Image: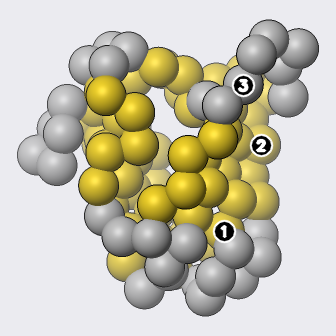
Amino acid sequence: MSDHDLTAVNLTSTGTVVAGRTRIRGIYNGSTGGTVVLKDGGASGTARFTLVMAAGQQCEFPGSILFETDCHATLTTTTSITFIH
């Protein structure tokens, strides 16, 4: 993780993680397994990252994933994902 100020956002269903430019640095699955698709530009935007996660799994990036417009997450099956940005 970075030494910069970070913020956490938890989603319990598909939706916007961050409105505006951001960098996602980590993802934590606090519920059942499922798929997370992160898109730049809303629900119909460009997919930047897809991850199939097990319950309790975490994914930390050595850098970050840049979202120029916004970061939208489509959640399938899983019901509680925390994003660090």
Q: How far apart are marks 2 and 1 (CA)?
A: 12 Å
Which residue type carries mark 3?
Leu
* Residue under pointer 1: 29
Mark 1 residue element = strand
Q: Distance between the residues labelled 1 and 3?
A: 18 Å
Asked if residue 64 is positioned above or below residue 54 in the image, the reply reads above
* Residue under pointer 2: 60
Estimate the x, y position of residue 80 in percent, counting from the top left.
Answer: 55, 72
The image quadrant of residue 42 is top left
Estimate the x, y position of residue 45 in percent, counting from the top left.
Answer: 17, 38
Among numbered discs 3 and 2, the one appearing first in the sequence: 3
* Residue under pointer 3: 6
Q: Do the residues under discs 2 and 1 have CB atoms within 8 angstroms?
A: no
Q: Which mark is residue 71?
A: none
Does residue 1 appear left or right of residue 84 in this picture? right
Mark 3 residue element = loop
Which residue type carries mark 2?
Glu
What crowding class fits label 2: few (fewer than 14 Cα within 10 Å), some (14-19), or many (20 or more)?
some
Asked if residue 79 is positioned above or below residue 57 in the image, the reply reads below
The image quadrant of residue 39 is top left
Among numbered discs 2 and 1, the one appearing first in the sequence: 1
From the image, state whether disc 1 or disc 3 is nearer to you: 3
Residue 8 in view: yes
Which residue type carries mark 1?
Asn
Asked if residue 4 is positioned above or below residue 24 in the image, the reply reads above
Does residue 32 appear left or right of residue 34 in this picture? right
Q: Quadrant of the N terminus?
A: top right
Residue 54 in view: no
Mark 2 residue element = strand
Q: Nearer the viewer, residue 41 or 52?
A: 41
Asked if residue 26 is positioned above or below residue 40 in the image, the reply reads below
